[in-house]
Image (spheres, helix red, strand yellow):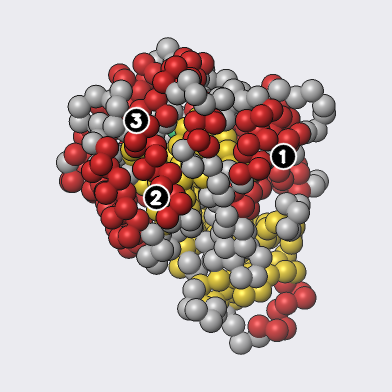
Amino acid sequence: MRAFRAAILRFADDGAAVYDEDGLLVVGPDAAGRQVVRAVGPYHALAANFSGVAIEHLPGSIIAPGFIDLHIHFPQVDVIGSPAAGLLPWLENYTFPQEAKFADNAHCGELATFFLDELLRHGVTTALAFATSHPSSVDALMEASQRRGLRMIAGKVLQDRHSPDGVRDQTEQSLIDTESLIRRWHGKDRLGYAITPRFAPSCSEAQLRGAGELAAKYPDVWIQSHVAENLDEIKWARALYPASRSYLAIYDDFGLMRERAIYAHCIHFDDEDRAMMRSTGAAAAVSPTSNLFLGSGFFDYEGADRIGFKYGLASDVGGGTSFSPFHTMLAAYYVGREGQTKPGVSLSPQKLWWQHTAGAAQALGLAGVIGNLQPGCEADFLVLNPAATPLLARKTAQAKSLDELLFSLIVLGDDRAVERCVIAGASGGAP
Ligand code: GUN
Ligand code: ZN
């Protein structure tokens, strides 16, 4: 066992932040050999119980759960910052040409390494990631993640129509490839597979039906897709699937709404859509930097909380503009303010942080496994430096409450505040 003494941030079951200014985090193997949190709490209450354990003292640092990115595209690193009139021209002019490059295995390997380095540098220890339609892009990301001991969830994109040569797949083969990738990767070490229809407009009925059949056959596999992001996209989806009540209902009609189904964006919903999210147990990946960059719209936090469905935060790189969870939380704050009709709803820094850690874990069905530092959680955590820049140091030194401290980090923080990233109890997540 090893122990760390520092300020420690974690979350209670109801989502409230728990903060020990002088805390002790003890990590070690559980009965199954996984590196987990064995004990956590105030240093003075716990230290005597662990007198034989080496304690690393980190004065001035904050230990916090690793961030979870609920929706990101590993092949879109080189798409970040590509301006377009909206989603559909952005896909056609920038995204599909970049994703076509993943037919080359060497490119897959190089980008997988770069992508994981970038996630970890920014303090993201788990992501739900799109690969491309090329099965080898999944292999590259999974192999690289496995080498670093990461809990990573990813899937091969399904897109058998309305997609150019180079990224379009073939219906029957795409489903065979998906099933063999599930068998190869799902549940191996810390890896998970996500069935990944790109979005309804790029998938034939046969492909969505096949995806739904795989989802029924493998109930603990994840599902990820996009929905209700952009008005032109919605019009197109409705025209292609006129029998469905709404864009979201298309996925339900094909058996793709359930626990462990994560839908990116979920902006242009009505209350029936929100009720369907709640009743099926699906969750939204709120992607504010992407939605602002592509002009897609604003996630309705009040609507989500009024009806009560699960959601968490995501970068959506490369529609999103940054890997940084701090930037994403700040953008979510702006969006929450924009749509605010009652003061205080959804906007507290504790809630924003929860949406990117324990709340995101809950959306994935992994509460108590990742995204938190309660006893039994896997030991993925960050050592944050609240004095990483002169302005951060000045501002955080004046914080008189946890809210003020977290807000300073959200507004002024970035990768410079992430001093260390610990994966399964070991520093670095090195390849
Ligand atoms: N809809 C379908 N594909 C994509 C994608 O790659 N990014 C975003 N933001 N939306 C999509
Ligand atoms: Zn996306």
Q: Name which residue lies at 68% across and 70% down.
A: 40
CA gap between label 2 and label 1 equals 28 Å
Q: Which mark is residue 308?
A: 1
Q: Quadrant where the N terminus lies?
A: bottom right
Label 3 CA crowd tier, 10 Å (few <14, some 14–19, many 20+):
some
Label 1 CA crowd tier, 10 Å (few <14, some 14–19, many 20+):
some
Q: Of discs 2 and 1, which sits in the foreground?
A: 2
| Number of numbered tags placed on the structure image | 3
Asked whether 418 or 361 is in front, the reply is: 361
Please, what is the three-letter code of the amino acid marked with disc 2? Leu
**Which residue carries the number 2 mark?**
214
Q: Name which residue lies at 71% across and 22% down.
A: 339
Q: Name which residue lies at 40% across and 53% down.
A: 193
Q: Secondary structure at mark 2?
A: helix
Asked whether 188 or 196 is in front, the reply is: 196
Please, what is the three-letter code of the amino acid marked with disc 3? Ser
**Relative image position of residue 135 (x, y in whole percent):** 25, 46
**Which residue carries the number 3 mark?**
204
Please, what is the three-letter code of the amino acid marked with disc 1? Gly
- Mark 2 / mark 1, whichever is N-terminal: 2
**Relative image position of residue 126 (x, y in whole percent):** 48, 53
Q: Secondary structure at mark 3?
A: loop
- Mark 1 / mark 3, whichever is N-terminal: 3
